[in-house]
Image (cartoon, helix red, strand yellow):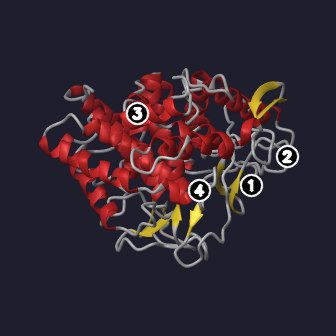
Amino acid sequence: MKRLRVIGLYTLCACLMAGTESCTNHKKAVTATPAADTLTDSELLDSVERRTFLYFWEAAEATSGMARERYHMDHNYPAGGPEIVTSGGSGFGIMALIAGIDRGYVTPQEGRERMERIVSFLERADRFKGAYPHWWNGETGRVQPFGQKDNGGDLVETAFLMQGLLTAHQYYVNGDRPEQALAKRIDALWRDVDWNWYRRGEQNVLYWHWSPTYGWDMDFPVHGYNECMIMYILAASSPTHGVPAAVYHEGWAQNGAIVSPHKVEGIELHLRYQGTEAGPLFWAQYSFLGLDPVGLGDEYCPSYFNEMRNLTLVNRAYCIRNPKHYKGFGPDLWGLTASYSVNGYAAHSPNERDDLGVIAPTAALSSIVYTPEYSLQVMRHLYKMGDKVMGPYGFYDAFSETDNWYPKRYLAIDQGPIAVMIENYRTGLLWKLFMSHPDVKNGLKKLGMKE
């Protein structure tokens, strides 16, 4: 695939609009930003995409090059420090880096060298039947338990990571000799994941976790619909440890039980959402950073794009109705998803039980591929709010106007989708790359999915 790299004056302008002094050194962020009203939509998108890209470039953990699980501007880390890196968030970050490299935010050589550092870390880091844990210590590559029994393989986070790696593979596979060598190393990591092991004895379902010390004690078979669809797609796509189609149909779709037509906020939804009538917005985003929902369908859902668009519209409509009368909620400010919250961390959803008055910018912004006009409306409003909600690496993770709560903190798994989906909206680059991988094509064909 031919790669388009932005150079010269356009690159310089992108740097200036993003508020940094240098495209190659990234040593010091400049807090001043252009007034929102002076920016065209294209300039606004570029400014937000590039700032968010810097989370994975400038704020990455130095030894591994991986995405830090979190980054707090006050350097106060109550649970786990800045050395903790994340597999899923790094998968999203790899895709954000590819977009930034292609746009000329860094040079091709700088970008490739960062990717080589990441791959070198993944080659030596702890793995469990080829699957990666949720967290590592980025300095050592040793697993950092996500919970007492969650100290082994996390197949969902591994799928998010592999989605990014396969995208990078396609970006480099037809390049020069060093790029092709990098693609070959990525392919080896992909082929090592033993998806069949996570069937827990050849069952027709995939299990989320396995630990070398606790075995299958977490006992979490994954059924749809939620954010985990990409795990089943990749398990079917593996050329070395691919699962049969029955695992998707019986495990994920539960022999058709995933289909459950219903209305929420007067908007039609076709699928059954686990534990709720309409889930948080990361369910519309994580699987579709590389997996292109446009034209994608199967026997359970005729159009994943339409379904995810409607899920986004439900979220927006609920926030506009605002049954709990939170300050700020409305057409300019909507978006409920998993994020930092006023009391820790929560999966905010469009229902009164899970709505805590917390807006996470990633919710509306990462839905730009589904609702461009509405998402841009939110993006411009957030931009106007200034440094209360925006820092050197893009918009902070979450805030509540009702509680006057504005923490200056970032989470990798929320930052990544912003940059990736903005790029997919602008050019479709990450979708084109991921969907061009021959193993992915074979997996989709195996599952009877139309593209």
In three-dimensional space, the C-alpha distance between marks 3 and 1, rounded to whole angstroms, equals 37 Å
Q: Please say if 446 is above or below 72.
A: above
Mark 2 or 4, which is nearer the eye? 4
Query: On residue 403, which mark appears?
Result: 1
Residue nearest the observer in this picture, 75 or 167: 167
Mark 4 or 1, which is nearer the eye? 4
Provide the residue designation for mark 2.
352
In three-dimensional space, the C-alpha distance between marks 1 and 2, rounded to whole angstroms, equals 17 Å
Mark nearer the N terminus (3 vs 2): 2
Picture coordinates of residue 137 (x, y %)? Answer: 42, 71
Provide the residue designation for mark 3.
430
Disc 1 residue type (three-letter): Asp
Picture coordinates of residue 205 (x, y %)? Answer: 64, 51
As helix, strand or loop, the secondary structure at mark 3 comes to helix
Pointer 3 with pointer 1, Cβ within 8 A? no
Question: Which quadrant holds the N terminus?
Answer: top left
In three-dimensional space, the C-alpha distance between marks 3 and 2, rounded to whole angstroms, equals 35 Å
Mark 3 or 1, which is nearer the eye? 3
In three-dimensional space, the C-alpha distance between marks 2 and 4, rounded to whole angstroms, equals 40 Å
Residue nearest the observer in this picture, 449 or 29: 449
Q: What residue is drawn where x is 52% and y is 51%?
A: 413
Mark nearer the N terminus (3 vs 4): 4
Mark nearer the N terminus (3 vs 1): 1
Q: Callout 2 environment at 10 Å: few (<14), some (14 to 19), or many (20+)?
A: few
How many tags in the picture? Answer: 4
Disc 4 residue type (three-letter): Glu
Disc 2 residue type (three-letter): Glu
Query: On residue 202, which mark appears?
Result: 4
Disc 3 residue type (three-letter): Leu
Q: Please say if 211 is above or below 273.
A: below
